[in-house]
Image (spheres, rainbow, N blue to C red):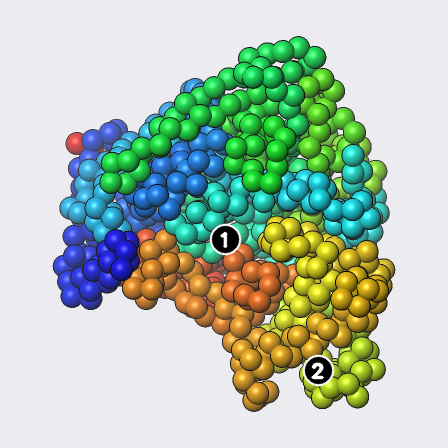
Amino acid sequence: MNRVTALSLAAAVFLCSCSSFFQGSVPQRDGALAVPGLSAPVEIVRDRYGIPHITARNDRDLYFAQGFVHAQDRLFQMDTERRLARGELAEIFGEKALPADRLFRHLGFGARASALFASWPAKTQEIVRAYCEGVNASMAAVRAWPVEFRILGTAPRRFSPEDVAAGILLKSFGLAQWAEEASLYKMSLRLPPAKFEELLPRVPGDSPVMETSFGPAAAMRPEPPEILPEGLASLRETLGEIPRCGGSNAWAVSGRKSATGSPILAGDPHLMLPCPSLWYEVHLAAPGVDVYGVSFPGAPGVVIGHNPKIAWGFTNAMLDDADFFVEKVDGESVMYRKKWVAIARRVEKIRIKDGKEEIVTVRETPHGPILSPILPGISAALSFRWIGYDGGDLVGSLYALNRARNREEFLAAVSGFPHPAQNIVYADTAGNIGAVTAGRIPVRKGGSRLLPVPGDSGEWDWKGYVPFSENPKTWNPPEGFVAAANFPPAGKKYRHYLSRLYEPPDRGKRIEGLLRSKEKFTPEAFERMQSDVLLPEAADVVALAIQVAKKREAESPAFREAAMILSEWDLAAGTDSRGALLYEVFYEKLVESVFRGGLGADLYEDFSRSSRLAWNAMDRVIERGDSAFLENTAASRKDSLEDAVARALLSAMNFLKEKLGGARSTWMWGRLHRVTFEHPFGKSKYLERWFNIGPLPVPGDGRTVFKQEFRRGTDFSVVVGPSMRQVVPLGFRASARSVVTTGASGHFFERHYRDQNPLWLAGKTHPAWTDRGEIDANAEARLMLTPK
């Protein structure tokens, strides 16, 4: 038994036997508490979901109190995320976290944090300092550190503004498209041109677009001229995945299509599903602001939410905001704009648990850090150019957004939104609805940049950013609705390159179809839409599978049974659906049948890890009915798509029989498709029962409106889903509702650690109380912070 396992087992035994161990870390949430750093009293009322409603007399005290409650409920989460951003996980998790630390030391978020904070305006700096002072005051007030720190035998250090800055870079990086681009580069080096060309992402011609005045998507395609496996594997062993680009939904209808006579807005961003939730619900009230929504523990302000006048939802714009440059290096110099310039060197020390240390040397070019030392399989000197390295005042933009009272103030607020680029759906009490792409859009030479470009001449350098006035926008369209679901913000007539790596159009087409299907919508109807699991775009694939199965019935009884199951399926991916189960397993086996042989094991791992690459390529094969990957080396001939479909059907039926048994009545999608909300400690079999929530059966898949994206291959565990949901009827704020995945608390033994999870699973929400009378009527605790 190794030391980590022994510690986990000992901790599990101790947790079973000693409830007093928990109670010491329960924060004070009732009564009065004097803390240094406040200028006036602040009231924090927690409702029956544990959500804090903070009332302060000024901005500084407001954000101090937000930092205070974040630390009360989510201190371990905040500490591990700042360690991740700074490359400091090995200090508490040991050598298994070293590759992840090396990755983030090379990315340099911690190294850039001080300069980023210094670049912010004085007002933003004041907010961030106040927030950190609140975090530190909360830490000073604890009787005992949260359980996780005590199990690890460590304590958190004080929070600094630089921690906030590094954390912002981490969150933005998780929504960038760097991983797919690096994977494509590896494939381009090893595949014949005909095969590689099939893998390049395309935008289907029938894809919705957010801003229709720029025309349809029109089948845009790029012009072609093992990313960090150790680091990412290490990260999965310690904290889980990097919060990654997973998709989102947001839509709004005008008063003309609303049963209330005023706009209604709904949104659900799709991200990783850790425990506790990525989000923290909060209500912030002070002179000039009254905002309710979700925040990130570790940063001030509300990211997604509503105030008395406006509401907004975020969806990832899927912007291509990162490039790799092939650098010409000679010793410690790099050719840049046809001149040799010195490579900057940064030497950092990684502290490892038990007193060890490792020295990491990072080399930086004018484009960004050279990542080749952590890019196995790539020998070129590749530097990483990313929009996050150019600074930007995200906190200040959110500060203005939280206070915006109309469309003009909203636009002014989001015009300063730097990254990650978001399609923000908007509605207000004046009756306006709209959608805006917020975030800096790089101006590039030559359009698409999915593969590395030469870094020596300067010819391929970014040429600045698109003026915000030219970012895609749409206002009050005649259809009476706006929607964003990770499809292109603009069509083929838009003159700036945005991206080629979008989500499949399925969710967007389904949402727009539902919005066209009714004359009037209620908030309840929007909640039902958010839980929609119909897969109309699967009809063609299902028809092909049925056709092949019936044609080959004489070859195996499995074909006859498969045809029967799929013929009876209603295209809804419900947890009890046998048809959905077979379809999902068949589709995965079909991807494997077509692509694994031609890619090889390692490239297939890269390819299949990105659902967007796999979906895009597979959809094109089905559409064309052919592929350069359809080869049968054993038979020295090329297969047909029918052959691949037949193999996939038999493989799927055999897999299900082995996995679930021969009793077809027990074949249900929810038996394979399950979600676990995983805590870092939940990776231990001795601790998972306390810290994890799940596994739990869940409907949908990666392409339904109720997105539940699972791991590619034969592991159907969900990795990305709705990280929160909100529905806001403008002008009827008392009826606004929301939900997060787990609960407000990060203390696993508290009720609010998991009390929202049943609502989330059922597609339900809870009231988002903002009326003072409703808050008082549903109050669970009341804490008065006073100056000390």
Q: Residue at x 67, y 23 (%)?
A: 455
Q: Is any atom of residue 413 visible in this view?
A: no
Secondary structure beneath disc 2?
helix
The amino acid marked with disc number 1 is Met
Q: Position of residue 23 (x, y in %)?
A: 17, 56
**Residue 86's quadrant in the figure?**
top left
Q: Position of residue 407 (x, y in %)?
A: 62, 37
The amino acid marked with disc number 2 is Ala
Q: Is residue 64 shown left or right of residue 761? A: left
Q: Residue at x 83, y 38 (%)?
A: 493
Q: Is residue 484 above or below residue 112?
A: below
Toward the viewer: 483 or 192?
Answer: 192
Secondary structure beneath disc 1?
strand
Q: Is any atom of residue 620 visible in this view?
A: yes
Q: Is residue 586 above or below residue 122?
A: below
Label 1, residues with CA under 10 Å away: few <14, some 14-19, many ≥20: many
Question: Residue 562 has which mark?
Answer: 2
Give the number of marks. 2
Q: Which residue is mark 1?
A: 272
